Structure formats: structure tokens, C-alpha cells
Image (cartoon, grey):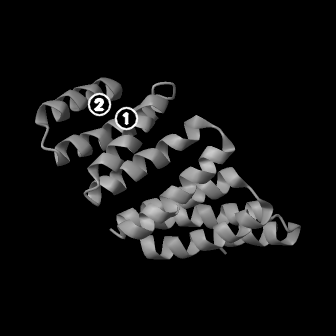
């Protein structure tokens, strides 16, 4: 019996739907790390089912963001955008700006890949503003997406400027 099976058995006996959903999340994270995005999406569907039953909006938002990331990895940009927009809507409802940064960055990246540069720029700018009051990791992720945006515009002086900022954050 592996760790996930054991954890699932325990939480099912206790009827703890939050923890059952978390086990599915953890399994999904492992599959993503292994590059098994399609299998990971199935597990997130299970996690979403349990999290929605107990009304954990922040968890639902995180799950939807992660599903959007999985679809981005599969280059299914339409589905990715749908999940990311839904995640952002829930995160705005929660009211904690710091939790919105990753979804804003992901949406910006998705829009850039769809050649919707104006929309992408707006998401990236909002994430940049929020990340200034957040941790270094959020700022690093935002720099990566901003770099992608400026490269898509072939604005290489800005790419270099963002690269320098990225280097200063990671030293």
C-alpha cells in the first residue's frame, strides 16, 4: 500500500472530505512533476468534487488554477483560460490579493500564447502590482511572464531590463 492509498483509507474512514480532496491534490502534484498532465487532470476533477461539496472557495480557486496550469502544459489554451478565469473569480471573492498573483500570471501567459497581448498585459500588470507587496517567489514568477510578454512584442530592451530584475531577485 502506498502513501496515498493509506492516507485515503484513513480520511475515508473519518469521512473527512477536505482531506480526501487534499489526497487527490497531492497525487495530482506528483503526476504533474512526472509530466503526466492528462492523468493529473482526472485527479483534480476528483479533488474539485470534494472541495466543492464543503464550500472551500480558496481551495477550489487553487484547484482551478492548477487545472488551468495543466491545460496550459497540454497547450489546450481555451480550457486553460476557462479554468484560470474561474479561479480568478473565486480568488477575488475570497478577498486576499496575494492569492491572486499566480492565477493572474497564468492568465497573462495564456493570453500571450493566444496572441491576445493587450489582455495578457493587463493580467501581468495587475500581478506585478500585487507581487510588490508579496514574497520574492511571486516577483520572480511575474518577471518570467513579463519577459515572455515583451519577447512576444519583440521589445528586446524591455526583455533585457526584466532579465536584469530577475537576476537581482534570484541572486
Q: Determine which quarter of the picture holds residue 59.
A: bottom right
* Residue 13 rendering spot, x and y as whole percentages: 86, 71
Looking at the rendered image, the quarter that the C terminus falls into is top left
* Residue 130 rendering spot, x and y as whole percentages: 49, 31
Numbered badge on residue 17? none
Q: Are marks 1 and 2 in contact (CB under 8 Å)?
A: yes
Name the residue: 25% across, 40% down.
147
Q: Determine which quarter of the picture holds residue 92.
A: top right
Name the residue: 44% across, 59% down.
69
Numbered badge on residue 166? 2
Counting every numbered tag in the picture gives: 2
Q: Which residue is mark 1?
A: 140
Residue 35 visible in the shown view: no
18 is higher (above) or lower (below) than 127: below
* In the image: residue 163, left or right of residue 87: left
Q: Secondary structure at mark 1?
A: helix
Ranked by sequence position, the earlier of labels 1 and 2 is 1
* In the image: residue 120, left or right of residue 91: left
**Residue at far front of view:** 118
Name the residue: 41% across, 52% down.
107
* In the image: residue 110, left or right of residue 91: left
* Residue 66 rendering spot, x and y as whole percentages: 51, 59
* Residue 40 rendering spot, x and y as whole percentages: 50, 70
Could you give the CA–CA distance between mark 1 and mark 2, rounded to whole angstroms? 6 Å
Residue 162 visible in the shown view: yes
* In the image: residue 162, left or right of residue 54: left
10 Å crowding of disc 2: few (<14), some (14-19), many (20+): some
10 Å crowding of disc 1: few (<14), some (14-19), many (20+): many
In this view, the residue in front, 153 or 75, is 153
Name the residue: 14% across, 38% down.
155
Q: Secondary structure at mark 2?
A: helix
Amino acid at each position: 500500500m502506498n502513501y496515498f492509498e493509506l492516507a485515503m483509507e484513513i480520511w475515508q474512514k473519518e469521512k473527512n472530505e477536505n482531506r480526501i480532496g487534499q489526497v487527490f491534490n497531492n497525487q495530482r502534484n506528483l503526476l504533474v512533476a512526472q509530466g503526466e498532465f492528462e492523468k493529473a487532470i482526472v485527479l483534480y476533477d476528483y479533488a474539485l468534487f470534494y472541495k466543492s461539496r464543503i464550500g472551500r472557495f480558496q481551495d477550489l480557486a487553487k484547484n482551478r488554477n492548477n487545472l488551468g496550469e495543466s491545460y496550459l502544459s497540454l497547450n489546450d489554451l481555451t480550457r486553460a483560460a476557462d479554468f484560470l478565469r474561474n479561479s480568478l473569480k473565486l480568488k477575488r471573492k475570497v478577498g486576499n490579493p496575494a492569492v491572486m498573483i499566480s492565477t493572474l500570471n497564468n492568465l497573462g501567459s495564456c493570453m500571450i500564447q493566444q496572441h491576445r497581448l493587450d489582455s495578457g498585459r493587463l493580467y501581468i500588470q495587475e500581478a506585478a502590482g500585487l507581487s510588490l507587496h508579496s514574497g520574492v517567489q511571486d516577483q520572480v514568477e511575474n518577471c518570467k511572464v513579463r519577459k515572455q510578454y515583451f519577447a512576444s512584442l519583440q521589445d528586446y530592451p524591455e526583455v533585457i531590463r526584466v532579465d536584469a530584475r530577475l537576476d537581482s531577485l534570484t541572486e
